[in-house]
């Protein structure tokens, strides 16, 4: 593992359209999280940082979730511009998985009408959507590699803590992990 005297890795995680399960699995790293803090500075994360704007010069970013709305799209493009190594973190990021189920049902307007008009008692789109407060849905949910180049794919729903550790530990030594074998690349 890298020496503590070396410059720390600028580490980030982001959460697009996902359920947070991948981040919860990251927290399952338990004592390895303490070890990790010797080698990384968490510069942006929904679970480890209060920073609101994605910073420049990030070394590694784990990306949970697919790209489902305009806000996801803009954040992902900004993250790509400012990060050396992007990791598709979990099946939603890699394939759209659960988040992409809506793609089978039609475009964004069809989904909104089904969810808010047909299946509710109010039978109308809420003001938050029609008034532009919520980010517009994209016509279809996209896996993140359809939007930006991705450097590493870490599948799983969620990837378990052992797999996450096996993927991250080599990065601390400036190496890429070997994503081979059932224990590293099995979906689900
Ligand atoms: S891959 Fe699974 S655990 Fe991760 S965000 Fe998607 S549904 Fe949740």
Image (spheres, rainbow, N blue to C red):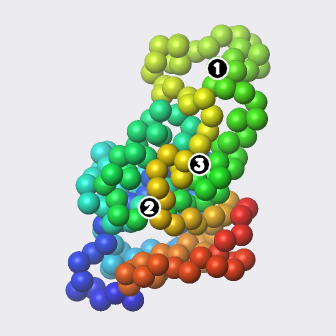
Number of callouts in the render?
Answer: 3
The disc, 3 or 2, on the residue closer to the chain's N-terminal end is 2
Quarter of the image that includes the N terminus:
bottom left
Quarter of the image that includes the C terminus:
bottom right
The residue identified by callout 2 is: 86
Q: Residues within 10 Å of mark 2 (few under 14, many from 20)?
A: many
Q: Is residue 27 visible?
A: no
Query: At which x and y percent is residue 128?
Result: 51, 18
Contact (Cβ within 8 Å) of mark 2 with mark 1: no
Contact (Cβ within 8 Å) of mark 3 with mark 2: no
The disc, 3 or 1, on the residue closer to the chain's N-terminal end is 1
Contact (Cβ within 8 Å) of mark 3 with mark 1: no
The residue identified by callout 3 is: 143
Q: Secondary structure at mark 1?
A: helix
The disc, 2 or 1, on the residue closer to the chain's N-terminal end is 2
Up/down of 175 relative to 13, above or below: below
Q: Is mark 3 within 8 Å of ligand 1?
A: no
Query: At which x and y percent is residue 153?
Result: 56, 65
Up/down of 54 relative to 167, above or below: above
Q: Could you say which disc has been placed on residue 179 in the image?
A: none
Q: Secondary structure at mark 3?
A: loop
Q: Which residue is located at x 33 percent, y 78 percent?
A: 39
Q: Quadrant of residue 103?
A: top right
Measure the C-alpha gap from mark 3 to mark 1. Answer: 20 Å
Query: At which x and y percent is residue 102?
Result: 71, 35
Q: Which residue is located at x 67 percent, y 26 percent?
A: 107
The residue identified by callout 1 is: 109
Q: Residues within 10 Å of mark 1 (few under 14, many from 20)?
A: few
């Amino acid at each position: 593992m890298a020496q503590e005297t070396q410059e720390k890795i600028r580490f980030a995680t982001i959460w697009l359209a996902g359920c947070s399960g991948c981040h919860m699995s990251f927290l399952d790293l338990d004592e390895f999280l303490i070890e990790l803090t010797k080698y990384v500075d968490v510069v942006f994360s929904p679970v480890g940082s209060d920073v609101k704007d994605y910073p420049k010069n990030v070394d590694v970013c784990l990306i949970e979730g697919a790209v489902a709305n305009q806000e996801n799209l803009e954040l992902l493009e900004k993250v790509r511009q400012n990060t050396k190594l992007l990791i598709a973190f979990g099946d939603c990021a890699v394939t759209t998985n659960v988040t992409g189920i809506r793609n089978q049902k039609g475009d964004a307007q069809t989904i909104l009408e089904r969810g808010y008009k047909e299946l509710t008692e109010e039978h109308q789109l809420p003001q938050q959507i029609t008034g532009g407060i919520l980010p517009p849905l994209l016509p279809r949910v996209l896996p993140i590699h359809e939007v930006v180049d991705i450097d590493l794919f870490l599948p799983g729903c969620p990837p378990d803590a052992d797999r996450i550790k096996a993927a991250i530990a080599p990065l601390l030594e400036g190496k890429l992990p070997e994503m081979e074998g059932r224990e590293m690349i099995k979906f689900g």
